[in-house]
């Protein structure tokens, strides 16, 4: 699908030029006014999440992770939206939101534990205000909507101290019934929820043309709420648009659909091969819109950062990645009989019996040739 | 006022009302549950008394009902979802088995989803297709879900309150053909544990295992058998997952004969599980194989022939006779 620049909210051009303000297709004028420290903070986030992601990809290639879903290319969409969240907002991610998790302060080892197969993504949603990864496509959009209905029922909406929920999903998910049901539900209940769609142009191998005949952000109009398309490779615009949508939600004005127009530079996961379904020139064209390069260019032009800053950020990101690698390799496997734990809050006699027989069976091998 | 005579439908309505009264976090949600009071009127009058935020009329989308209930539960609510008919639960099946059933496990116990999914189930009311199914095996097969069903007003009244109070996600099956049958409900009676089977009629000769709508059929068969001098022991399972087979095993050890009755098709159904486990536990007590009396392995038939499909008193008695043929 051709990019339609008239509709794309952009505050930082691919060359690193700051756009003062941009009017979205929703008629809203978007801008940001950040301190130098905040600009540098965005840069640090982008570089760090890319470096951690690269480390995870390497770990998968070395057989230390079963699979990895890389965020390469989508850092700005995730960091921009992630930094727009307030502590009380609740996040409902899919399975590629490592950058959002990073912004939520979740230890980066958590998603790696999931993909290594030592757990199933068990960070505490209540404490982190971030739900677990959802692999069934789009299911979490309904969870976000229900949660947002609860915010309204709790009276935590309607002012600046209100709360909001945000659901992350991809372009493929917009074909799912659950996502469309979430749109209907959130509209009719004016639920304080933001739908953040990272349109990375592919659902595994299926291009966006296989999901829609209209730009995704335009779908929102049919459900009765605003839709806006943002340059997902522009961290400033992603931040501004998400911040506005969250404010819109928490002040009681209901949902917004954000389509972050971006590109998945790598494979869907380490299991597929994009060369089978994507022309090489396409990725090359997107490389010129790289989210990190453009922010670096801006920082240099504005003399917000110098060589020593960039070198220090690289060093710090590398150190974090090395530390992460060491910790991943040291994660112990769970105890065999932990498979029986937490199936039910109140337990089950069937499982109690199975667990006892399983342990007795295992113990029967102790001291034997097995 | 301790004891009242109520229909099962009214007993469930009273139980829901008490649950709403007791805990402000309990919310009822579903299609037509508000102003209409549900197509079977089980939620009759509740929205009027508790408001639109406690008894929520939803858009017409079953996956949405369960999916938003997950979010509400994460927010601290205790949703009670009504699926209008058994045959309409399948659009919500993914949310139930992939999300509701697994989130406690995936989160290592950090997330609890105290969701009750009420489903009127089974046939015998002359409905059109998709309105008379018995989907219990799908849910009982799913780890992380608990599945219960009531067979009489007293159980309906207490079990719905127990299910709502439980932190386990529970599929609550209501035998729709029994909604209008009356029985005594003692609001002050001590509650029987939710996941326990109970002996509905003691007997010495054959153990008949049933649940939901078939308990009445089994009891009628027992009355008829008694006239011929055979004492059937009828066990109402009440809980389908977990199964409380202790009372069944104990009974079969005495009777030596066992017949399992359910409306659902026999193939890979609850009866197969019960037969296997009774055989394992009671092998040396059995005088004959465990027999099943079930619906046939067809889609639910048209209303004019559903009486041919549904197990009735005669088919139960025939199976009882056959247990004496070995």
Image (cartoon, coloured by chain):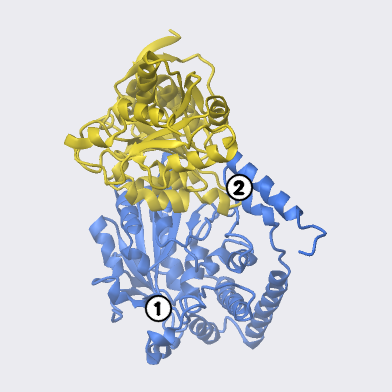
In this rendering, position of residue B150 left or right of residue A109 = left
Q: Secondary structure at mark 1?
A: loop
Answer whether residue A148 is visible to the viewer in this image.
no
Q: Is residue A12 left or right of residue B297?
A: right
User: Which residue matches tag 2?
Assistant: A342
Mark 2, chain letter? A
Q: CA distance from mark 2 to mark 1?
A: 51 Å
Instruction: Please name the color used to draw chain B.
Output: yellow
Query: How far from the left and from the top, in percent, is residue A66?
Result: 58, 72
Query: Do callouts 2 and 1 point to residues on the same chain?
Result: yes
Q: Chain of mark 1?
A: A
Identify the image quadrant of the C terminus of chain A.
bottom right
According to the image, label 1 marks what residue? A19
- Mark 1 or mark 2, which is nearer the start of the sequence? 1
Secondary structure beneath label 2: loop
Q: Is residue A100 visible?
A: yes
Residue found 56% across the figure and 31% down from its top: B249
- The answer to which image quadrant residue A285 occupies is bottom left
Q: Residue B285's x, y, as percent?
A: 57, 32
Which is nearer the eye, A5 or B32? B32
Tell me what residue is drawn at x 40 percent, y 28 percent: B320
Query: Outermost residue, right direction?
Result: A367
| Vertical side of A312 occupied by B25: above or below | above
Tell me the quarter of the image containing the N terminus of chain A.
bottom left
Name chain A's colour.
Answer: blue
Compared to residue B148, the image places residue A208 above or below, namely: below
Circle 2 or circle 1, nearest the eye? 2
Q: Residues within 10 Å of mark 2 (few under 14, many from 20)?
A: many
Q: Report how many numbered discs are placed on residues in the image.
A: 2
In the depicted view, which residue is nearer to us: B209 or A160?
B209
Q: Are marks 2 and 1 in contact (CB under 8 Å)?
A: no
């Amino acid at each position: 699908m051709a990019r339609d620049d008239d509709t794309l909210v952009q505050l930082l051009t691919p060359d690193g030029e700051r756009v003062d303000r941009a009017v979205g297709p929703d008629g809203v004028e978007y801008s940001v006014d950040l301190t130098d420290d905040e600009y540098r903070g965005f840069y640090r986030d982008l570089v760090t999440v890319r470096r951690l992601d690269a480390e995870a990809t390497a770990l998968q290639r070395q057989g230390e992770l079963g699979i990895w879903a890389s965020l390469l290319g989508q850092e700005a969409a995730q960091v921009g939206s992630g930094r727009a969240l307030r502590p009380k907002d609740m996040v409902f991610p899919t399975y590629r939101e490592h950058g959002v998790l990073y912004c939520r302060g979740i230890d980066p080892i958590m998603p790696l534990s999931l993909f290594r197969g030592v757990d199933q993504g068990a960070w505490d949603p209540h404490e982190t205000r971030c739900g677990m990864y959802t692999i069934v496509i789009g299911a979490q959009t309904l969870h976000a909507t229900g949660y947002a209905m609860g915010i309204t029922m709790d009276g935590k909406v309607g002012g600046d101290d209100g709360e909001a929920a945000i659901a992350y999903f991809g372009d493929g998910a917009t074909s799912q019934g659950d996502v469309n049901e979430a749109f209907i539900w959130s509209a009719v209940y004016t639920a304080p929820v933001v739908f953040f769609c990272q349109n990375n142009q592919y659902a595994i191998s299926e291009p966006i043309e296989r999901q829609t005949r209209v730009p995704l952000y335009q779908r929102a109009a049919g459900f009765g709420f605003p839709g806006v398309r943002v340059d997902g490779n522009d961290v400033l615009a992603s931040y501004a648009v998400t911040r506005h949508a969250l404010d819109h939600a928490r002040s009681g004005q209901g949902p917004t659909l954000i389509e972050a127009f971006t590109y998945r530079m790598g494979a869907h996961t380490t299991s597929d091969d994009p060369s089978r379904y994507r022309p090489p020139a396409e990725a090359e064209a997107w490389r010129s819109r790289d989210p990190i390069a453009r922010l670096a260019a801006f920082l240099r032009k504005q003399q917000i950062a110098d060589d020593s800053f960039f070198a220090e950020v690289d060093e710090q990101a590398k150190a974090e990645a090395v530390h992460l690698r060491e910790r991943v390799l040291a994660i112990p496997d769970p105890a065999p009989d932990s498979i029986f734990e937490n199936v039910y809050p109140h337990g089950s006699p069937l499982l109690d019996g199975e667990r006892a027989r399983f342990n007795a069976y295992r113990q029967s091998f102790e001291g034997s040739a097995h | 006022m301790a004891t009242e005579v109520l229909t099962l439908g009214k007993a469930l309505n009273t139980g829901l009302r008490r649950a709403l009264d007791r805990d402000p976090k309990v919310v009822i949600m579903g299609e037509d549950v508000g102003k209409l009071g549900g197509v079977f009127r089980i939620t009759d009058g509740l929205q009027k008394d508790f408001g639109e935020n406690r008894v929520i009329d939803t858009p017409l989308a079953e996956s949405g009902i369960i999916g938003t209930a997950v979010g509400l539960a994460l927010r601290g609510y205790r949703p009670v979802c009504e699926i209008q008919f058994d045959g309409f639960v399948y659009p919500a099946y993914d949310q139930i088995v992939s999300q509701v059933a697994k989130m406690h496990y995936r989160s290592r116990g950090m997330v609890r989803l105290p969701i009750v999914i009420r489903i009127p189930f089974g046939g015998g009311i002359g409905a059109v297709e998709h309105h008379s199914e018995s989907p219990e095996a799908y849910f009982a097969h799913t780890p992380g879900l608990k599945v219960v069903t009531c067979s009489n007003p007293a159980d309906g009244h207490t079990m719905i309150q127990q299910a709502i109070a439980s932190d386990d996600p529970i599929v609550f099956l209501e035998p729709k053909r029994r909604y209008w049958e009356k029985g005594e409900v003692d609001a002050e009676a001590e509650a029987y544990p939710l996941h326990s089977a109970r002996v509905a009629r003691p007997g010495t000769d054959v153990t008949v295992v049933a649940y939901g709508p078939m308990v009445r059929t089994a009891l009628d068969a027992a009355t008829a058998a008694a006239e011929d001098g055979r004492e059937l022991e009828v066990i109402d399972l009440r809980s389908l997952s977990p199964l409380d087979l202790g009372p069944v095993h104990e009974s079969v050890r005495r009777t030596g004969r066992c017949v399992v009755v359910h409306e659902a098709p026999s193939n890979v159904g609850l009866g197969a599980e019960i037969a296997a486990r009774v055989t394992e536990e009671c092998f040396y007590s059995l005088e004959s194989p465990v027999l099943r009396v079930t619906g046939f392995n067809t889609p639910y038939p048209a209303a004019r022939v559903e009486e041919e499909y549904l197990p009735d008193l005669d088919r139960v008695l025939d199976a009882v006779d056959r247990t004496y043929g070995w």
